[in-house]
Image (spheres, rainbow, N blue to C red):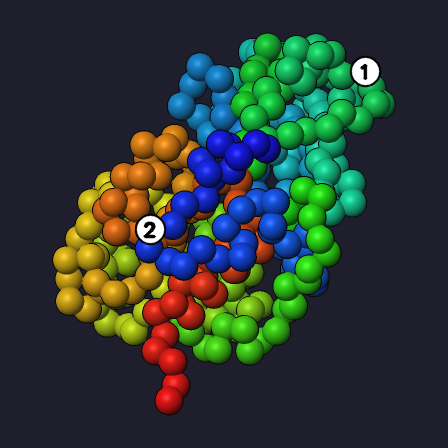
Amino acid sequence: MNGDEDSMRFQTRHLEPPAYAHPSQMLAKTGPLDNSLPWVIEFRAVGTPITIQVQVKDSMILGRSDAVTGFKPEVDLTSCDAFAKGVSRKHATIVMRGDDKLMLQDLYSTNGTRINDVTCAPPTEYRLRHGDEISLGRLRLQVFFAVVPAHTQPVPPIILETNPLNGLGKHVLVLEDDKDVGNVFKLALDMQGYRVTVVDNAASALNTLSTVSIDAIVMDLLLPDMDGFDLVRFLRRQPNTAKIPVLVVSGATAGYQMGKALEAGADIFLGKPVAVEELMRAVKAMIAQNTPARA
């Protein structure tokens, strides 16, 4: 990842430059978080609006369900017209190797598996990365990581401890319409001692903010009922929410989108895929910046 790409992933509006602002300075591990937080991976069927998002297990089969036998793979591609496109019931598998690698393996399927147009010869495992395209028979899937447990760049082994005192009982509102991503964010924040409320639409977020004291907001830009930029602007205009720090986590990584989010009033922008330790440090920095020092 070069310097230009780094700046496209992380920006702040007005916070002091934090120690973690550059990916080359990210934490290598999150300690116990690595073994307890799943990856969230998204499959987008090329040429269709279909998106399948799942929390990654140690091993998960990609294929199609079978009503006769009752078989259902962990990544069920039936809705993608899988049968007509030559996808086998047990077509391929994704396995986790160590804490930073996902591997793709063809399961001797009838119509074969390809990754970036390279044929996967069973039982060989092939490294799966963010942005890859895999083909199962004639079904093409783009692969995107939404949340990853640990940063995998070769960086100093600084440890973010799983300490219940880190969150100090602060209340974080997570606004994320994808259930899997929201669950991972909640789990990570819970483990750091934060109180967490997760909602999946802007209306629920505004209702929460009107009834509960919130110390920080973590939100996506793509919401089902309101434009994310408009929501941030609205929050900044309301007396009760104007000073609540806002962290935007989004797959919209174009510089224009990030700049627009910061101009609207977001404090930090993190691009997906987001590492758990990025999220933790960003939330901690925002709350610390917004908490008056004790006399």
Q: Which mark is residue 13?
A: 2
Instruction: Give x and y (percent) for residue 77.
Output: 56, 26
Up/down of 265 relative to 207, above or below: above
Instruction: Give x and y (percent) for residue 198.
Output: 40, 59
Q: Is residue 136 left or right of residue 179?
A: right
Q: Nearer the viewer, residue 293 or 191?
A: 293
Q: Nearer the viewer, mark 1 or mark 2?
A: 2
At x 68% / y 62%, what residue is drawn? 159
Q: Quadrant of the N terminus?
A: top right
Report if residue 119 is visible in the image.
Answer: yes
Q: Nearer the viewer, residue 88 or 276?
A: 276
Q: Count neighbours of disc 1 (C-alpha within 10 A) and say few if under 14, some if 14 to 19, many if 20 or more.
A: some
Badge 1 or badge 2: first in the primary sequence: 2
Where disc 1 sits, the SS reads loop
Figure quadrant of residue 188: bottom right
Q: Nearer the viewer, residue 281 or 155?
A: 155
Up/down of 161 relative to 33, above or below: below
Give, as a three-letter code, the residue at label 2. Answer: Arg
Up/down of 83 relative to 28, above or below: above
- Residue sticking out furthest to the right: 123
At x 28% / y 72%, what residue is drawn? 212
In the picture of the structure, the residue carrying the numbered disc 1 is 121
Give, as a three-letter code, the residue at label 1. Answer: Ala
Report if residue 36 is visible in the image.
Answer: no
Q: Quadrant of the C terminus?
A: bottom left
Up/down of 290 relative to 89, above or below: below
Q: Is residue 126 left or right of residue 198?
A: right
At x 56% / y 37%, what residue is drawn? 145
